[in-house]
Each structure stands twice: as structure tokens, then as C-alpha cells.
Image: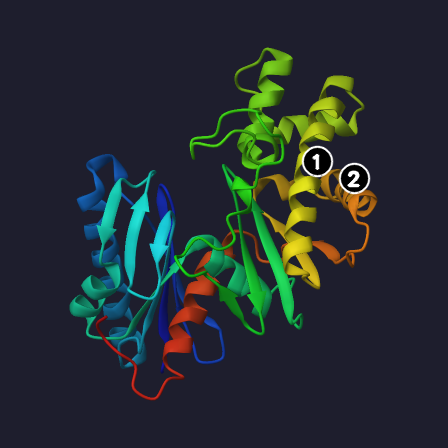
Amino acid sequence: MRHVIALDVGGTGMKAALVGPDGELLHQDRRATGRARGPEAVVAAILDFAADLHAYGEKHYGEGAAALGLAVPGIVDEPNGIAVYAANLGWRDVPLRALLADRLGIPVALGHDVRTGSLAEGRLGAGKGADRFFFVALGTGIAGGFGLDGRVESGAHGFAGEIGHIVVRPQGAPCPCGQRGCLERYASAAAVSEAWAKATGDPGADAADCAKSVTSGDPNAVRVWREAVAALADGLVTALTLLDPRVLIIGGGLAEAGEVLFEPLREAVQTRVTFQKLPAIVPAALGDTAGCLGAGLLAQDLLTTTTPEVTP
């Protein structure tokens, strides 16, 4: 059966699937990245995992995968297939596309994890049918992907969609990027967890705890949540002013709060728009499978070209 390998690499774990021609998941697997052993061990783990998935396809479906799609975090040079930098994995300038293509002998596509997840949400999930959408992932940090007619824009240098580093509070909290007042310092799951832990005096308190306390009417929780939603709305209005999406898709850990987040967020965005057209603001539909599904789409897209390249 003609199929592709989809591989999504996270900070500590990897999710993978063999995807059939109609998008069906033929086989799924997970492994640790082994990052405690260093960046070279992580690269070796990716190569070995991909090789095992290729062998599984040969054994069970009569042929190996026709292509591979790989989603990785950090800074990604997608056109050249290079994983430029990832703080949580420790690598710099790793030619992952070439390494995988040499190992497996099949065409390989490399993508940024959030943009790859955006692609899946746009084609298969909450943005399906929308010609223009903007996906925002609220996790440890905040990043996004702008979808246009079935593809996701990576930008001239691979930095498109970095909404987490829009300054929403000038001269505010310092950000590791070097600026002050970045959106992700106020509205990421990590930022809400930090603010709630400080408010409660409990270092183990997190954003999920804060959301539960909001529903019970805890005034401190309401204050922390309101400040995060206000910052997020400021960032989103900047994005929709620049991009004019038809749909705003919100995913990541913070979005798991459901209407505790979406009800005040829709209201906050609506009060901030003036001439802009208000897009639909909807939760992501694919959860933590988006990256893997998007990687599968990257691989399948390679097969639509006449003569896919095996190496950069």
C-alpha cells in the first residue's frame, strides 16, 4: 500500500504514523527523543525511528514509505531542510532532510512544528474550507501559522507566525528573545501558570488550576485570567489587522480551558476591533495529533510534484 511516514518531534517525545493515500492512519507509534543524552543522540533517535517505521511499512504493506514528513520545534529553514536551532533539543544547523533522505532513500519534507500543525488544522481541522486562517498555539510559548489557500506561510527567513513576540506591554516583562512585554510573557500557558503560582503562593499551581478557580469565582484567579485574556486579545487584534483571516483558530494547552477562555476572549477581541472584520474565533479540532497529521500532509504534498528530490 502506498503510504508516507509522518513524524512529529517534541521536546521530550516523538509521535509518528504511517499514513495511507486517503489520510487513514495505518500505524502509530511513540518514542522518547533521548534529549538527556545530547543533541547528537536526538538526531540519532530520529533517524532510527524513521528507519524502523520504513521497515514496518515494508513488512506489513509490501513496500516502504513513498515519502517522509518531519515536524520539529525551534527555528527551521524549510526550503533547505535544516533544523537551525532548538533550545529544548540543543541542536544547531542540523541538515535533517538530507540525513533522513540519505538513510531512507525517499523524498523528505521538513517543517516547523506549529506551522505544520497549522497546516493540518487548516486542511483537516477547524479551518477546513477557509481560504485564510490564522492558527495560534498557546503552550509554553506562543506561536502561530497563517494559512492561505491550502498552504501555510513560512516567511522569507522562516520566522512567519511568531505572534508570541509581538510586544503587547511596552517596557513590560523581559522576554528571552531580548524584547520586553512580548505576548507570550502574559498569555502563554507558562505565563498564566507563573502568575497563578505567584498569586496563590503555591509553586505547583498551574494554568489549569487557575481556569478551575475562575469557574468557582475566585477573585485572584479572575484577575490573573482577565489580564492574560486582555493581552491575548491585544496580540490577536494586531494579527487580524495585518492578516485579515476568515478564521482564528486557538489551540495549545491554554485552549483546553474551553469556554472559560473563548467566551471572554471573543468579547475582548470584539471590543477592540474598529474597522477590521471580526473573524470566527474557534478552538483547534485536532489536539496533539495536529503536528503528526501535518507532517503527513507535507509528505503527501511531495508526491504531487513530478520529480521529487531526495536530497536538498
- Which residue type carries mark 2? Pro
Residue shown at 59%/15% (left/top)?
198
- Residue furthest bottom in the image: 306
SS for tag 2? helix
Tell me the tag on residue 106: none
Residue at 66% across, 26% down: 210
Which of the pair 72/37 is nearer the observer?
Answer: 72
Question: Can I make out residue 283 in this image?
Answer: no
Q: Residue furthest top?
A: 201
Image mark for residue 264: 2
Label 1 sits on a secondary structure element that is: helix
Q: At 37% from the left edge and 42% from the top edge, which residue is drawn?
A: 11
At horizontal 62% and vertical 21% (from top left) the residue drawn is 196
Percent coordinates x, y for residue 25 in the rendering = 46, 69
Where 35 sits versus 107, above or below? above
Between discs 1 and 2, the one toward the N terminus: 1
Residue 31, visible in the rendered structure: yes
Q: Which one is in front, 185 or 89?
A: 185
Badge 1 density bin: few <14, some 14–19, many ≥20, Cα 10 Å: many
- The kind of residue on which mark 1 rests is Val
Residue 184 in the image: state x and y as whole percent.
55, 36
Q: Which residue is mark 1?
A: 229
Q: Are marks 1 and 2 in contact (CB under 8 Å)?
A: yes
Mark-to-mark CA distance, 1 and 2 = 7 Å
Direction from residue 249 to residue 46 in the image, left or right: left
Q: Quadrant of residue 56?
A: bottom left
